[in-house]
Image (cartoon, coloured by chain):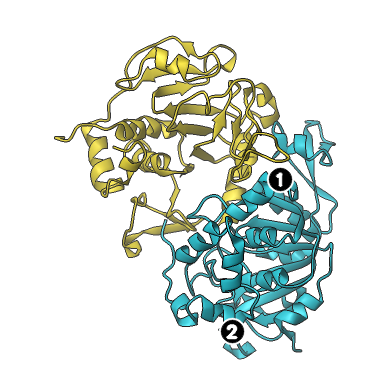
Amino acid sequence: MSESITLSEICISASSKAWEGEGEILATGIGLIPRIAAGLAKLTHNPDLMMTDGETYLISKPAPMGKRDISYDQVEGYMSYSRVFENLWGGKRHAMVTPTQIDSFGQTNISAIGDYDSPKVQLLGVRGFPGNFINHKNSIFIPNHSVKTFVKGKVDMVSGMGYQNKELSNGKFEIKLVVTNLGVFDFNGEDNSLQLLSLHPGASVDDVIENTAFDVIINSDKATQMPTNEELAYIREVLDPQGIRNSIFGE
Amino acid sequence: MDKIVSHKDVIDQLSNGMTIGVGGWGARRKPMSLIREICRSDIKDLTVVSYGGPDVGLLCAHKKIKKLIFGFVSLDMIPLESHFRQARQKNEIEIMELDEGMVQWGLRAAAMNLPFLPTRVGLGTDVLTYNPELEYVTSPYSDGEKLVAMPALKLDVALIHVNKSDEKGNTQIVGPDPFFDELFARAANKTFISSEEVVSTQDLGGKDGAIFNRFERSLVTGVLHAPCGAHPTSCAPNYGFDIKHLKEYSEAAKSFDEYSSKYLNRTHKDYIDSVGGSEAILNIPLPQF
């Protein structure tokens, strides 16, 4: 690979590990990086994953980013919104999402910022977060790791539940991976605290501590694994040949 | 049997304070011509149940909504709905914010004539904090699990846009995703359909067409012929969403009067002309994700 490896490619490779060992489930990557990452997981370590065309059909190969000739999509099944709900209530799904806020419990917010009755910023609404987080595993991608996203106390409107309420989920709740522009994390620190697993190139432990408004467990400062040549080829030639991923970090 | 109605006939059946369910999803297959008709009527204080898109936004901009029951409001390609945001940020509407699946569960309970349906969804979230009227139910079986009792969302009226209908209300939603329109129809006392095409029963396509018939005609009170009636939302496979128009609409949150005088407060036919005519709309390609 002649081109230098970009941060978005590192994040895609790291995020794809969310679906490692997850078996034959529906992989939903919402947003640019999670979507390419889900596709990469399917093309590399988990070919059994089911994925949609971004709309109503399950297709055999991940849909590349940008305009494509959809007549080449090999449709293999149906996944209307109604079917998505039925599927997720049964727990056979792993989604990667980008909440606007996340707290030390792993609670997430995509509803509103500020006072709930007249929010400073109204966002989408809770969408499917309450149902997703209580019914199946999720992972999180945050492109702008800061004290505004990793907030002190609790998020303004708890849309996705957190670890302190884990027993409500019949054993289904888990945030498997948190990938940010600084590094890779999970919630397997003591008492389900957020812990650093690896740092991306150029990021330091101090960056992580300064940009997280709650305590992060630092047991390691090892470097995030670089994408392999095979992964880079899939990202650059198959999943995102137009380089739309570069828009995420302005690369 | 002839259930054909005009835009005005539908409005005549609505009254202040009603609970209205709107079919479609985000910027897809919304009965926009009927929504615009409500906006130019005197009807007010509505409770609206919707997987929200510009239907919710336009009703907010016209101060028609007293209470919104929703899981999200979005224009798809434009994730945030500017008119809805403005209404929320100025505290102009009451809300019942729910998980998308809870909305479905509430409609399904109403459709099944049940007081509630149990679910885990909502537990551990502020959906319960901000909707204190939501109650719990304990499983009567050995697990004894405490669940949310999602109450039935009963509708006075459902408004749904479809691809095809006959005059008896045998409707067809031909696009690949029928969303939750069937449940809106079942949860409502009366359902009014707007349809791209109104055809004779023998032109519905027989058995092959009947697969696309998502709910029975007995649920349908009135059928309105509204070609391009979903514009600026999409109506697959007939046309995609009008991104250019949705951007202009979205921007209009700053100065709504200009948008309003350009496009609203006119008949459906005049509206279609004002946005470029039906031929142009039918040429809008379907979105690709």
Percent coordinates x, y for residue B46 in the rendering: 79, 61
Element at label 2: helix
How crowded pointer 2 is (Cα within 10 Å; few <14, some 14-19, many 20+) is rated as many
Is residue A30 placed above or below B111 in the rendered structure?
above
Q: Badge 1 is on which residue? A: B97
Q: Give the quadrant of the C terminus of chain B.
A: bottom left
First reached walking from the N terminus: tag 2 or tag 1? 1
Chain that the image shows in yellow: A
The residue positioned farthest toward the top in the image shown: A219
Give residue B204's mark.
Answer: 2
- Asked whether, in this view, residue A186 is left or right of residue B220, the answer is left
Give the alpha-carbon distance from disc 2 to disc 1, as whole Å: 38 Å
Visible in this render: residue B241? no
Chain that the image shows in cyan: B
- Comparing A248 with B59, the one in front is B59
- Comparing B132 with B272, the one in front is B272
Element at label 1: strand
- Asked whether, in this view, residue B254 is left or right of residue B126, the answer is left
Percent coordinates x, y for residue A151 in the rendering: 57, 24
Q: Which amino acid, mark 1?
A: Glu
Kindly check if marks 2 and 1 are in contact, taking CB atoms under 8 A apart as contact: no
Which chain's residue wears label 2?
B
Q: How many discs appear?
A: 2
How crowded pointer 1 is (Cα within 10 Å; few <14, some 14-19, many 20+) is rated as many
Q: Residue at x 47, y 27 (%)?
A: A177
Percent coordinates x, y for residue A18 in the rendering: 43, 32
